[in-house]
Image (cartoon, rainbow, N blue to C red):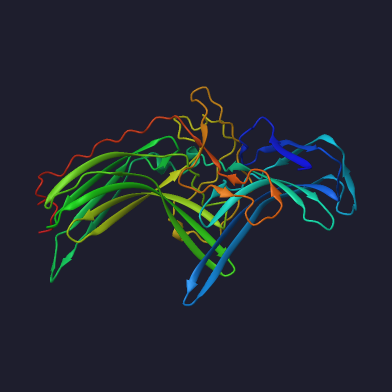
Amino acid sequence: MVVHCDIEFDQNPTGTYYAGQLVSGKIVLKCDKVKEVKAILLKISGSAEALWTERHFSTRRMYHGREDYLSSSTYLMGSEQSSKATIAVGVHTYTFACQLPYNCPSSFEGIHGHIRYTVKVALVRPWKFDNVYNRAFTVLRVTDLNFESPQIRIPSTSEAYKTFCCGPCTTEPLKMELKVPQTGYVPGQNIPVQGIVINNTNMAVSEVKFMLVMLVRYTSTKPQRINIQRVTVSKIKSDSVLRYCTKAMKEELHVPATPPTCIQGSKVIQIVYQIEMHCKMKSLNKTQVMTMPVIIGNVPLANNTRRFNVIDEQPTASNRDIREVGNDLKEEDDAPTLDLSTPNMPPPSYEESIHTQRSNINEGEEHTFGPSEFAPLYPVFNVSTPSLNQTPLPMGIDNKSFVAP
């Protein structure tokens, strides 16, 4: 290769930034022989894109949505009007800097789309294909749990009832109860869950399972359509429950590296989380599911809400179900400046999410060089798990007090 290009970030080898920070670095071109080009163009961009196909009768229809958050172009050599520029033999270094918008959403790679930020260097050549060098970097929108609704700090309980039809008869109800100590967490924490199953039916519950699930909503623009992807983040199997019996289960769901809850900031891709409790009925081979929404942030809850030196109050992200989020989302003009340094807590590590995609950023482009595979990195914290007080079981395992007279 005549020209080799390295894209490096200043004091940030992994290329991980928070929204509002300055992205700076250098472009190093190594040329082993004289290279004639029209210009050298540097592009820094960020966008969300969703793409999928669906079958409608005998045809397949494509759905596509796109939204841009960042677009910066600079000529390192030559210009749009220039006809020829020469890259001499040797090493050539160019510096760059770009301010990230405060309201841009977090990086994400999914099965039907992505939110992606890249640095691209193009050797523009007349009458030939351009030589393009790409490098993606991670952007994290600040989701500070200390500035969410105070309700995420208190215990939350969900209940569900279900009866089953057996021929002309209907069983007594199955009651499911799910309790957590709070509804806001960060990667690295465990979520203590307590489930109570009051089984008044004449069928056993063969398995109870708890899951942390990520719901990703992709929205196309022309034509407008919604595609919701359900991703299991973590799960744990618990006990069975005999018929006419009651059982309480206490488990912990681990929160691994994962993108934060994202409802505001992107109209194309939104992300929410929920805890699910599954009860599989043995005789009917049916599973009853109960859900509870939770928020996953990237700044943990603290006793002192100013512990992380967040300046200005964070916009509050609603905990609505992702199916209710419309396209009337508003972007906030003012956002906080974040300083994650604190003597009371070690800094987070940054890790790849194992339940999202590792994508080829050069897919669909010809004559492109540089690292092709990319996966965003998300902060993982070493913070304590909140405690959950055990709820006492109802009196009597025959559940007579639960059955309506």
- Side of 199 where 106 appears, left or right: right
Q: Could you tell me which residue is drawn at 57 percent across and 53 percent down?
A: 114
- Side of 41 where 67 appears, left or right: left
Residue 28 against residue 264 in the figure, above or below = above
Q: Could you tell me which residue is drawn at 81 percent across and 37 percent down?
A: 32
As drawn, the residue found furthest toward the top would be 343
- From the top left corner, tell me how far across and down residue 163 is, in percent: 19, 62
**38 or 177, nearer to the observer:** 38
As drawn, the residue found furthest toward the bottom would be 58
Q: Could you tell me which residue is drawn at 74 percent across and 40 percent down?
A: 5
Quadrant for the N terminus, please. top right
Q: Could you tell me which residue is drawn at 52 percent across and 42 percent down?
A: 143
- From the top left corner, tell me how far across and down residue 273 is, in percent: 42, 49
Residue 395 visible in the displayed image: yes
Quarter of the image holding residue 4? top right
- From the top left corner, tell me how far across and down residue 151 is, in percent: 40, 43
Quadrant for the C terminus, please. bottom left
- From the top left corner, tell me how far across and down residue 205 is, in percent: 19, 52
Total marks drawn? 0
Residue 327 visible in the displayed image: no
